[in-house]
Image: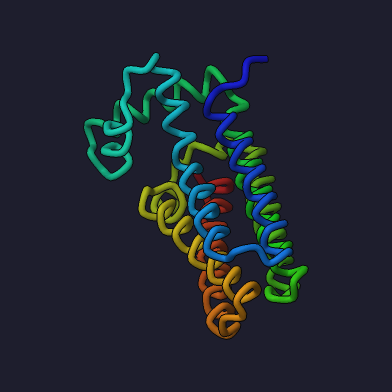
Amino acid sequence: MRIRSADLVTYLRTALIIALAYLVIVRFNAFIIIFLLAVAMLSDAIDGYFAVREESNGKIGFITYVRAATGNKKEWDIVHKIKQKASESAPYGPRIDIAGDRISEYVLWVTFTYLGIVPLFVLFIIIIRHSFADALLGAKGTSSKMHSKIARALYASNASRAGIQITKFVTFAYLTLVYVLEYPLWIGYILIGILTAYILIRGIAEIYEATHG
């Protein structure tokens, strides 16, 4: 089976997150870790571009993809159609992307729980939330296609996707500073609370999609 460039980006991103977890544990340079974390999270947006570019035989440039992602309706319609075609020609692609996202997120949550920074009950909440949402959406086959308005607004919109990525980055970057450089933990608890709430809200949207969309 040929490995698509988009899937390769997912594999590399996942491997980088696992390596970062080790660097946090051994208290490597905090700012290098944060920089690499930013690279890993930015790559989560890039894999979609590679899937579109490959399906369009290189006709869709990065600027066009960015313009579509930031709300240009005409270009979004073009990119969206190509994304749907890419999902049909390689149905495992979105699943690989989801698997990479879950592995990366779990690795970060488990690492900081192991280090005594994230409370264990928060880890349980995250695992239960993802397990239910993924199972329901997977059963319906809509894990990458949202139809209901609430799911599109709270989960699939560009604003929601960007917001969750930024919140994850800020939270895990700060938790790195807490463990490596002993920054105040109480700020970390606030960020953990915000991120957990955000994840739960998006989870509600996913479950609603699976049962009503």
Residue 194 spot, x, y in % from top left:
51, 72
The color scheme shown is: rainbow
The answer to whether one can see residue 35 in this image is: yes
Q: Looking at the image, which residue is at 40% across and 23% down? A: 53
Among the 4 quarters of the image, the one containing residue 92: top right
What quarter of the picture does the N terminus occupy? top right
* Observer-nearest of 74 and 103: 103
Q: Is residue 162 above or below residue 117?
A: above
Q: Please indicate whether residue 62 sits to the left or right of residue 120 in the image.
A: left
The answer to whether one can see residue 201 in this image is: no
Residue 79 spot, x, y in % from top left:
34, 28
Q: Looking at the image, which residue is at 59% across and 42% down? A: 13
Residue 138 spot, x, y in % from top left:
65, 39
Q: Looking at the image, which residue is at 72% across and 56% down? A: 22
Q: Is residue 158 above or below residue 172?
A: above
Q: Please indicate whether residue 53 sits to the left or right of residue 118 in the image.
A: left
